[in-house]
Image (cartoon, rainbow, N blue to C red):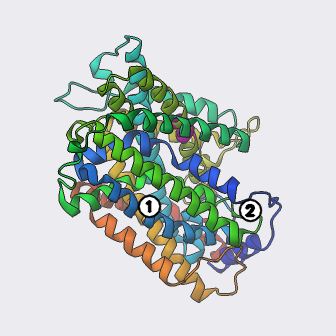
Amino acid sequence: MNLFRKKAVATSTSTSLNRVLGAFDLTMLGVGAIVGTGIFVLTGVAAAEYAGPALILSFIIAGLACTFAALCYSEFASMIPESGSAYTYSYVAFGEIIAWILGWDLVLEYGLASAAVASGWSGYFQGLLSGFGIHLPTFMTSAFNSDAGTFVDVPAILIVFIITLVLTRGVQESSKLNIIMVIIKLAVVLLFIAVGVWYVKPANWVPFTPYGFSGVTTGAAVVVFAYFGFDAVSTAAEEVKNPQRNLPIGIISALAICTFLYIVVSLILTGIVPYTELNVKDPVAFALNFINQNWAAGFVSLGAIIGITTVLMVMMFGQTRLFYAISKDGLLPKGLQKVSSKRQVPIVSTWVTAALVAIFAGFVPLNQLAELTNIGTLFAFSAVSLGILVLRVKQPNLKRGFKTPLVPFIPALAIIFCVYLMLQLSTFTWQGFGVWLVIGLVIYFLHGYRHSKLNQKNKI
C-alpha cells in the first residue's frame, strides 16, 4: 500500500496539464454532463411511482446530497489526477480490497447508468418516429414486460453499438462542442417550459404528496441519477485556474442551475399531466403531445435525442476507462487494458462494455436500472466522502489543489444524506446490490488477489 501512496503523492505534486479553465467553463462542463436522461426521462417515472407532484422536494434533497459529495470529489481530484474516479481515490485512502469493492461498484454504476440512458434514448427516438407515422412492432420497443407485450428494446441496443463504433475510433473532448450541446439541451428545456406553462392545471398538483414523505425521500433516492455526471467537474481539477475558488463555484453553480431546471420542469410536467400517467420513457415529449402541441414535442424529442446521445457517450467512455484502470492494477484480466495501436483506445474494454450495456438496456426495465444505478452511486459517494476524513488524519500534509470546506461537517453530511437515501431504496435493489458485491468478492479472491500488481510488488 505504501508504494501506491508514494506514487499518488508524486502524481499529485506534478502535472503537465495547463490550468486554463475558469468558473464559467466548469459550470458549462457540469451542466453539460448533468442535463440529459434525468430531466428528459426519470422525471416521469419518479413522479408516477414515488413522489407525485412533490418531486420538486426530491430533487432538492438529492441535489444537496450531491453537492456535499461533489466537494469531497474535488479534493481527491486535486490530489490524484488519474483515471478511475472513486476506485483510484479509495485505493489511496483504504487499500486494495476496498478499492476493488468500489471499482466493482462503479462497474455496476456506469454500466447500468449507460443502459438506463440508452433506454431513455429509445423512448424519445420512438416518439420521434411516431411523429412521422412510423411505429415499431410492440415486442421490440421495450424491455421484457408480459403485460405490455414487450420483449426487447431494439433501439436501445442499436444506439449502444453505434456509440461503441464511435468510441473505438477515438473520442476527443472539445470545450466548444460541449458548449454547443449544452445550448441545444437548455434550449429544448426552455422550449418545454415556455410552451407548457400555459397549460398547467393546479388541480393536478393535488394531492401534493400522494405517497407521503417516504415517497419524497424514495423519489430523491431515484432521481440522484439525474445528477450523475457532476464528478466531470471535479476530475478537471488539474486544469483549473485558481481551483480553491473556481472548483466550488463551478460545482455549486452547475448543481444549482440543474436543480432549478428540474424543479420548474417537474412542476410544469405534473401540472400538465396527472402524475399517475407519467410512467413513460419520454415524459417531456409525452406531456406536449398530451396538450396537442405536437410540433413542440417533435423539437423536444430531437433535442433530447441529441442531448442523451452525448451523455451516453460520456458514460460508456467512463466505463471503458474504469475497466482499463482496474485491469492495469491486475485486478481484472490484462486483456482489458489492450490499447489499439492505431486509435489509441482500450479496444477490448470498449467492446466488453458494449456487450454488458446492450444486455441490460435491451432486457431490464428502466425503473430497475435507475434504482440499481443509484445505490451504486450513493455507495461510491459515501466512500469518497469517508476517504476525505481518513486522509485528513492519515496524510494531512498531502498537497491539495482544493480542500473540501468545513471538514468534518461537509463529508459527514454527504455520508448521512447518501446512506439515508440508500435506505429508501427497495428490498429488491438491496438484494441485487448485495449479489453484485458477492460476485465481485469471488472474482477478487479467485483472480484479483493473485494477479494484483501491488501484491506482487510486496512479495519482492
The answer for how far apart the CA atoms under marks 2 and 1 are is 23 Å
How far from the left and from the top, in percent, is residue 404?
Answer: 59, 76
Residue that appears at 65% across and 43% down: 346
How far from the left and from the top, in percent, is residue 401?
Answer: 72, 73
**Quadrant assignment for the N terminus:** bottom right
How far from the left and from the top, in percent, is residue 190?
Answer: 50, 38
Q: Nearer the viewer, residue 20 or 460?
A: 20
Residue 452 is marked as: none
Few, some or many C-alpha atoms within 10 Å of disc 1 (few <14, some 14-19, many ≥20)? many
- In screen coordinates, is 391 left or right of 47? right
Three-letter amino acid code of the residue under disc 2: Val
- In screen coordinates, is 423 left or right of 261? left
Which is in the foreground here, disc 2 or disc 1? 1
Residue 63 is marked as: 1
Tell me if residue 261 comes above or below residue 20 in the rendering.
Answer: above
Tell me if residue 98 comes above or below residue 432 in the rendering.
Answer: below
Is residue 440 among the parts visible in the rendering?
A: no
Q: Which residue is mark 2?
A: 240
- In screen coordinates, is 4 left or right of 356? right
